[in-house]
Image (cartoon, grey):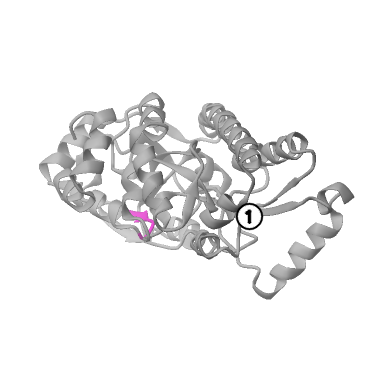
Amino acid sequence: MATFITRRHLGAGLAGVIAASAALRPAAAQSAKFKLRYGTAFPADHPGVTRIKEAGEAIAKDTNGQVDLQVYPNSQLGSEPDMFSQTRTGALDFMSTSGANQTVVPVGSINVIAFAFESYAKVWAAMDGDLGNHVRAQFEKVGMFVMPKMLDNGYRNITSSAKPVNTPDDLKGFKIRVPGNQLWVTMFKALGAGPTPINFGELYAALQTHVVDGQENPLALISSAKLYEVQKYIALSEHIWDGHHIFANLKKWNSLPAEVRAVMTKHMDTAALKQREDIVGLNKNLIETLTKAGVTFNRPDKQLFRNALKTAGFYAEWKEKFGAEPWGLLEKYTGAL
C-alpha cells in the first residue's frame, strides 16, 4: 500500500480514463514512437508524481519526441499489487511500489527491517549500493527491471491517543493498526503490542472509535489522511524506512533502443534524487504544521527498541528467513543487528 493515499479501482472505467487522457495530449506526444504508461498510487501533487512527470518531459525533449511517458497517479490503473502484476505481464510498462508490497521476491522487503537504518545517509548508501543491487537483481530474475535509484516513501512513526510512546514498555498491550505484512506483525508482537491489520480506508474510524489505540505511518500520510485529528501524540520512532522501486517490464525495457534506455535511466535517477530532497523538506514542514494543529511530538530512544527486538529474537528470525547473503549486505550498512 502506498503511504499517501487510499487505493481505488477504476474497473470498467479504466479504458475511458486512458482514452480521455490520450485525447488531451499534444499532437507531438500522440505521434511519439514509444508511448509508455507509468502507474503509481501516489496522489497527483506528491513529489513521487511531479518529479516523474518532470522526468517525462526531459525524456521527450532528449529523445526528440520519440518517448511519451504517460503518468497515472492516484491508483488510476489499479492497486499497487495489481499494477505490479500488470507490469510483470507486460500490460503496463512502468510502476512504482515498495518491495514489501509483493510476495514474488521476498527479499524485496529487507529494507523494512525494524530500526535497521539510523539515518538517510545509511539508507541511500545501502539502497544505491550493494544491498539495492542484490534486490534489483532478484527482481530481474522474475521479469522486472528496476531503476537504479529508489523514490523515498519516508520513515514510519507511531501515533497514539492516550499517551506518548517513549519506550518499549509503552507498547505493552497497545493495540496498533498495521498493514497485513508479517514484518510489521512480528515486530510489534516482539515489542509486546497487539498488531491489528486494518484496511487503510477504515483506519480513521478505527482510531476514532478506539478499535485500536494507535497506528504507524510516515508523516505525510498522517497529515493527508488527517489522522492527527484522532491521535494526540506522534512518536518520531522512525522504526521502519520504506521506499518505492521504479519497476519496468523487463522484456519491454530491453526492447527499447539502448540510447532511449540511457536517457530514461538518466532522467528517472535525477527525478528520484530530487524527490528524496522534497520528502526531507516536506517532513520538516509537517512537524511544524502538525504541532500548530495540537499534536505533541516526542523522540524515543531507538536503541531501547532495537535491544528489545534483539532480545525477543526478531532479528535472528528474519536473518534466517532472508538468508545469510542478503542479511550480510544489510548489516554492511547498518552494523550488526
- Which amino acid type corresponds to the residue marked 1 in the rendered image? Asn
Note whether residue 301 is visible: no
* SS at circle 1: loop
Residue, far top: 121
Most foreground residue, 298 or 256? 256
Most foreground residue, 49 or 288? 49
Q: Image check: 209 left or right of 256? A: left
At x 50%, y 59%, the residue is 84
Based on the displayed image, in which of its 4 quarters is residue 118 positioned?
Answer: top left
Q: Quadrant of the C terminus?
A: top left
SS majority, magenta: strand
Label 1 crowd bin: few (<14), some (14–19), many (20+), radius 10 Å: many
Q: Image check: 216 left or right of 193? A: right
Based on the displayed image, in which of its 4 quarters is residue 11 positioned?
Answer: bottom right
Give coordinates of residue 14: x percent, y percent: 69, 68
Q: Which residues are magenta?
A: 175-180
Give coordinates of residue 106: x percent, y percent: 32, 55
Most foreground residue, 259 or 93? 259
- Give the mark count: 1
- The vertical placement of 262 against 319, above or below, is above
- The vertical placement of 24 against 127, above or below, is below
Q: Is residue 125 magenta?
A: no
- The vertical placement of 182 against 314, above or below, is below
Residue on which disc 1 sits: 74
Note whether residue 84 is visible: yes
Residue, far right: 27
- The vertical placement of 322 against 241, above or below, is below
Give coordinates of residue 86: x percent, y percent: 55, 64
